[in-house]
Amino acid sequence: MRSSDGTIFILTRDDNNEKSLLVGANESGPGRTVPIANSRTMPQSNVRLVEGQGNTLLIGGTRNNGVSTFSSPLSDGYLAKIDREGRLIWELEIARNRKNELQSIASLPSGDVVVAGRDGDHAWLARVSKDGRLSWEKTFGLGKVASVAVMGDIILVAAFEASGEPVAGRIQARVALWRFSDAGELLGQQIVRDEIAQGPSTTWVMKVTAAPNAIYVFSAWTELMMSPITTKPLSVIKMDMQGHVLWQKEIADTSFQTRIGSSLCVHAVGVLTDGSALADCPVDGGIKLFRLEPNAGEIARTFLPNMQRQNCDGMVGSSWFMVQRSESAVWVFGNGRGCTWLQQISLTDFRK
């Protein structure tokens, strides 16, 4: 998240994996680390989402992962507003004795936010007021993964939608895009990736981004129940504001073969200010990056060596997300074993 003074904030964990830490970074690199002053919410958590609102930050994610007495998966969604010193202003917990996950945050022009994720077997969308109260919530689609973006007073959500009956016990799904008003009214829904996902696992990418005059949907997933294990590589779809597809590209390099099948390497995706789409693929020794030009989605590539390899105890770094720092540079944030790292890449280094 970029604040008004240009500082970019990320959430990470301490060395003992007990507390979430707020890290600010600017042109000189990572700056001071601020412990989140809320002892009861952060341990054993996956709280990594950050959204800025003036001098305050909204942080969110999923925590308390576990199983019920009947071995059903359980988790709680979590959202909090803090100041830039890590002090808690309010918090909201979604704990309903089932799988609740908060996976995406976006701000509305009013100052409220919308959050998307999972509520049991369904995708979930909710509006949260400035003082931390649920204004409304909706369930729809499949409870796997969801991403939310805001386009004026329109809310966009990308998630899986069931497609027919299960086959051999495996859910059949496709990637869809929902449109809601800021009052929660369903305005429309469309399938945006027609390939069938057969019981997609927890290894996936799903993101919707609203850019000036365009909507982008990124999707990729692994099917662990297949033998051998199969993947669907990253697909990037660009649409106009009415939902007409302008182009769709699949990046085969984001899937690779292993001893037991194929595996997915893409982690972070985004859209640059010039309308180019950006995606990554962590590999041994660094990260492959892909840039899709805005007019027709032509793909260019570059490679970012892992300069933090030794600091990460020799682990291949996994990127969390990318932030455009300037017209010519992007920051890539990631983690290895026991560390969080930040590297800058030049947007002039890509080659077709």
Image: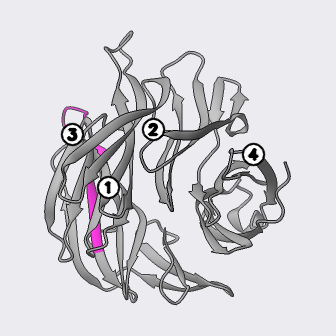
Q: Amino acid at mark 4?
A: Ile
Marks 4 & 3, CB-CB < 8 Å contact: no
Mark 2 to mark 4 CA distance (whole Å): 27 Å
- The image quadrant that residue 200 belongs to is top left
Which residues lie in the magenta part?
66-80
- The image quadrant that residue 266 belongs to is top right
Residue 233 vs residue 349: left or right? left
| Mark 4 / mark 3, whichever is N-terminal | 3
Mark 3 to mark 1 CA distance (whole Å): 33 Å
Name the spot of residue 285 as percent of width and height, x first.
80, 53
Name the spot of residue 160 as percent of width and height, x first.
38, 34
* Image point (62%, 63%), residue name: 272
| Mark 1 / mark 4, whichever is N-terminal | 1
Q: Nearer the viewer, mark 2 or mark 4?
A: 4
Q: Which residue is mark 4?
A: 299
Magenta stretch holds residue 329: no
